[in-house]
Amino acid sequence: MGAELAAAITGVVALGVLFTALIVLYSPILPAASWARVAGVSITCAIPGVVAWLVLGPVMSAELPRIMMPSLALLGGICCFLVTLVTRSAGSPVVSSLLFSAIWAAGVFVPTAVRTFEPFGESTPFGLSPVDHGGALPMSVAVGAGMLAVFVVERKSLIRGARHHTPLPLGIFALLCVVVSWIVWLMCAEFVIDEVAALIIVNGAVSAVAGAVGWIAVQLITHGQVSLRSLAGGLVSGLIAVTAGAPLFTPVSAAVAGLVAGAIACSFTVRRGSPLGNQLRFLVNTHLLGGGIGVISLGILATGSGFLFTGQTTIFQQQLLSVVATASYSFAISSGFWWLISVGGRRLGMWRRSTANEILVEQ
């Protein structure tokens, strides 16, 4: 019990550091504002995820150990912060982003997290039992699909203009904190620190570095130049790719998953044209593509159970269908409710978007 409690506490601390670092790392995507406002709105948008899990989680997940609840509540807050980044980048009022966060938390995060962390419980839908160690389905696939939904709805009303400025040293420090805290969370996601912890650390580091290599290689080949954002995109893609299977990969298979995730995410992200559009595609692709590739790759590369080890496609099919079901469900819920909140709200005169810098974004 002592080891479980220590792992749970460490996991909460790691997720808290991760949340703080992500606020700093992703702040350039947001309209210019003071750090106090950026942090305040970010925390506000995260609160529904925490509340939704604490209220609905115990009801929907009778078989989940209660020691997991604080970490999963904080994970819900991070997911809600992430999924509202595109709404905030589009200049939407805080109230509309907060309402979307609450609906998404209750309607998407909680059922997806229950399915992920209690895969063999009675609540498992469609007969799917995905393997997902660190929560890639709710944190990456569902979040990425939700971002994409908002991006599609808002494609003609995204704003450019002044973005929030983050000093380069602070951005580098935040990126390092993201990498370290993410790996620590993966180590603690078993809620016991044992001999597998060393493998998880190695796999997390290897996949992150491989993701950076894949992203930078593709960007150098296609554009001949890279930036700090290239490094950030690659590292985050690699971390997301290893999230589902950190204890189930070998270092070689973790490197393969990270390399593929970084390369594919870059190829769909880096385009000539709108800088803001690139930043928003960065968000969507690193999470949706990185998470999807990571979850699916378990069906092929998982030690002892993947296709390469057994020749069986059962796990691969389960992983693939879980990604498709999660992404489709999150996209449908997110696009429908965001259209009602944003477009419907403006038509009813409930609120107006700031139009000072509003222009079309090239698709």
Image (spheres, grey):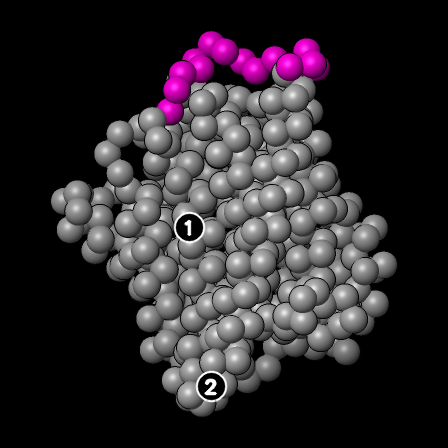
Q: Residue at x 63, y 36 (%)?
A: 336
Q: Is residue 35 above or below residue 222?
A: above
Is residue 226 among the parts visible in the rendering?
Answer: yes
Left or right of 98 on screen, residue 302: left
Give how far across and how far down residue 216 sits, in percent: 24, 53
Point 31% across, 64% down: residue? 259
Q: Amino acid at mark 1?
A: Thr
Q: Main secondary structure of the magenta part?
A: loop
Where does the magenta region start and end? 347-361
- Mark 1 neighbour density, 10 Å: few (under 14) some (14–19) many (20 or more): many
Q: Residue 312, which numbered label?
A: 2
Which quadrant holds residue 136?
Answer: bottom right
Image point (52%, 30%), residue name: 153
Residue 349 highlighted magenta (yes or no): yes
- Pointer 1: what residue? 286
Residue type at mark 2?
A: Gln
Element at badge 2?
loop
* Residue 293 magenta: no
Q: 94 or 288, which is in the foreground?
A: 288
